[in-house]
Image (cartoon, rainbow, N blue to C red):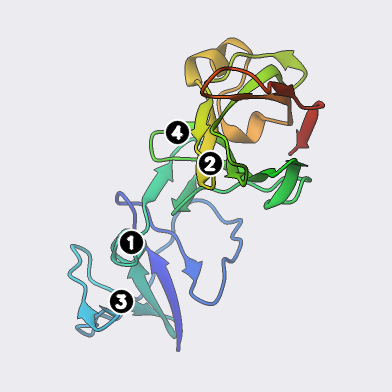
Amino acid sequence: MKIKFWGLCCISMALCFSGVSAFAKTGSQKIDAVYNNIKIVVDGKEVSTSTEPFIYNGTTYLPVRAIGEALGKDVRWDFQTNTVYIGSEQLSASNSANEVIYDSNGIIVTYTGLSVNNFGEINVNLNIENNTDKNYTFQVRDFSLNDIMFEPIFSCDVVSGKKAVDGIYLPLWSLNDIGVSKAEDIKNVEFSLHIFNSKDWNDAVDTEQITINF
């Protein structure tokens, strides 16, 4: 029997359990649903739901919010695009996620993807490794978005021998000023990294321009 997830904020939708399926239909139709006291158990724990699962045309439909949260994932409905986001809203880019964008003198910076949280805040995610014997601060310079100069928010301190997971935050109010209302409107970002010794501001390095296309 097939299993599908449905129901988020009183909106019905279906996501195939074995993978995400694309549906183009809109509107409404009457269906003959079968209710049979279906229980949902995740990792040995029964999940309570406000909407009862049902069977239609040989497929069992489950409430997507309850299942997502039971798996420890944030669930968000975007009414503007009719999209359900489960967990991190990782967006695809022509630059591969987990791509090293800087590697020199014991410092490695890896681009890990563009993401959106539950509040719609957009971040260009980075993993930073400091394999040196000094503490360093990382900032961005000459940042542009869709070929328009832009002021993001980013400053990350990484002590000797440690790693950091951080993101270049793109303020929503500034994005609106350049006509960007959602992450899908972002076509590319360009920036350089300014890296300096956190203790005495010496050993400063400005990387070459880094380009990420989406």
N-terminal of the two: label 4 or label 3?
3
**CB contact under 8 Å: marks 2 and 4:** no
For mark 4, does the 10 Å Cα neighbourhood hold few (<14), some (14 to 19), or many (20 or more) residues? Answer: some
* Residue found at x 44% / y 73%: 4
Q: What residue type is labelled 2?
A: Ser
Q: Measure the alpha-carbon separation of dots 2 and 4.
A: 33 Å
**CB contact under 8 Å: marks 1 and 3:** no
- Residue situated in front as seen by the camera: 41 or 78: 41
Q: What residue type is labelled 1?
A: Gly
* Disc 3 element: strand
Q: Nearer the viewer, mark 4 or mark 1?
A: 1
The residue tagged 3 is 54
Q: Measure the alpha-carbon separation of dots 2 and 3.
A: 55 Å
Q: What residue type is labelled 4?
A: Gly
**CB contact under 8 Å: marks 4 and 3:** no
In the picture provided, is 152 more to the left or to the right than 99?
A: left
The residue tagged 4 is 120
N-terminal of the two: label 2 or label 1?
1
* Disc 2 element: loop
Say which mark, if any, is on residue 160: 2
* Residue found at x 22% / y 71%: 52
**Can residue 58 be seen by looking at this rendering?**
yes
Q: Single out the residue that lies furthest toward the bottom.
A: 1
N-terminal of the two: label 4 or label 1?
1
- Residue situated in front as seen by the camera: 206 or 51: 206
For mark 3, does the 10 Å Cα neighbourhood hold few (<14), some (14 to 19), or many (20 or more) residues? Answer: many
In the picture provided, is 195 more to the left or to the right than 209?
A: left
Q: Which amino acid does label 3 sit on?
A: Phe
